Image (cartoon, grey):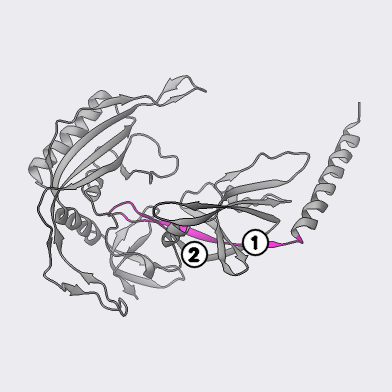
Amino acid sequence: MPTAAEASGAQSQIEAALDAGLDAISALEKVEFQRYQKWVLSVDGSVYWLATGERMTAQGALHYATDRHQDEDQTIGANQVIFSSESEVTQFNVVDPQTMWIGSWPIPGSPPLQVAFSARGNYFEQADIWHYSGFAVFPALKTQIISTAADLPSGPIVSNSLPIWLSYNAIAPVYSSFLVPDNAAPPYVAVHVESTDSLAAAPLVGPWPGVTLPNSGASPLHELPVSIFARDRVRFTTYGFSNQMIWQYLAYLEEASVSDELFGYANSPIPTDAKRPQVEIAALAQKKEVVIIANYYQGTANAIARRLILQAFCSFQAIGGVGGFGQGAIFQGGVVSGVGRNG
């Protein structure tokens, strides 16, 4: 049986050999990463990542494999990335759902890859090599990675009834589907608009050209009133709700439909139980689903979104230390965006 010193020496030999191999295949290359701050539009839950200017450099070997996809709406090369490092990149271990590190990797003849990691591979102690993996930012998602707050939209992104449902959050937090915050604790509601149909012969648009937005380029944008009578099929998924609580939530929405007159029911919604198990604890989550078919005017949803924006009056400190005051939309993490001006 080897002694502790011998075992330690054998481990060091393994590490030295693997480190030498990693240095050889990587040519001591370095990857520059920039920290981004998460910005969530309060009007419809859309997520953006804003560059903070904070940078770091990590040394290691970066490998990527490209898989070409031809879909109905895009033709892309999906780049799967693995970054191997001789030492742990401690910045990646900070558990902060409001920040993310994105690396930039040059590609000859093409724009650089924007690299983000979603997983850390198995760590083998004797090897002492760290592996981080993920996919480069897809082209369709590059609009969500922005450099300055000026690139943030001033109004809602969605074109359905989602702003209506996000505004009714007195019972529990309400999030857009696929955009629930990391490790959110129940109770909460996730809203998914499954379909949108028109109930009118034609939308009411105009009058053209509406209000031309200043400084919007050679082909200017127009703030053009649009309204149409529409019907959405909306699925609400709740976690942490008891039977009494889900009916209280439905009564809350029904009362709002009468008092606020923002939407009307086209069905009789009833909650159903969904099975969400975890084998490690042999239990089921308190998951329920409700489908509501709602009639509304799309102009109403847009008005609610604008009202949420205008409700936020606050002073704020911009990135870079410039103070300001103005109207804006409050984001998760205490960040504000809007029509304020530098002080």
Q: Disc 1 residue type?
A: Val
Secondary element type, mark 2: strand
Label disc, if present, on residue 31 of the rendered structure: 1
How many marks do you count on the picture? 2
Q: Which span of residues is magenta-colored?
A: 27-48
- 142 inside magenta stretch: no
Query: Between 311 and 17, which is closer to the camera in this rendering?
Result: 17
Residue for point 24% across, 54% down: 159
Label disc, if present, on residue 229 of the rendered structure: none
- Residue at the extreme top: 282
Q: In the figure, is residue 24 to the left or right of 146? A: right
Query: Between 43 and 83, which is closer to the camera in this rendering?
Result: 83
Residue 80 point in image, percent of width and height: 58, 51
Secondary element type, mark 1: strand
N-terminal label among 1 and 2: 1
- Mark 1 and mark 2 residues within 8 Å of each other at the beta carbon: no
Dot 1: few (<14), some (14–19), or many (≥20) neighbours within 10 Å? some
Residue for point 43% across, 58% down: 140
Residue identifier under label 2? 52
Residue for point 46% across, 56% down: 75
Dot 2: few (<14), some (14–19), or many (≥20) neighbours within 10 Å? some
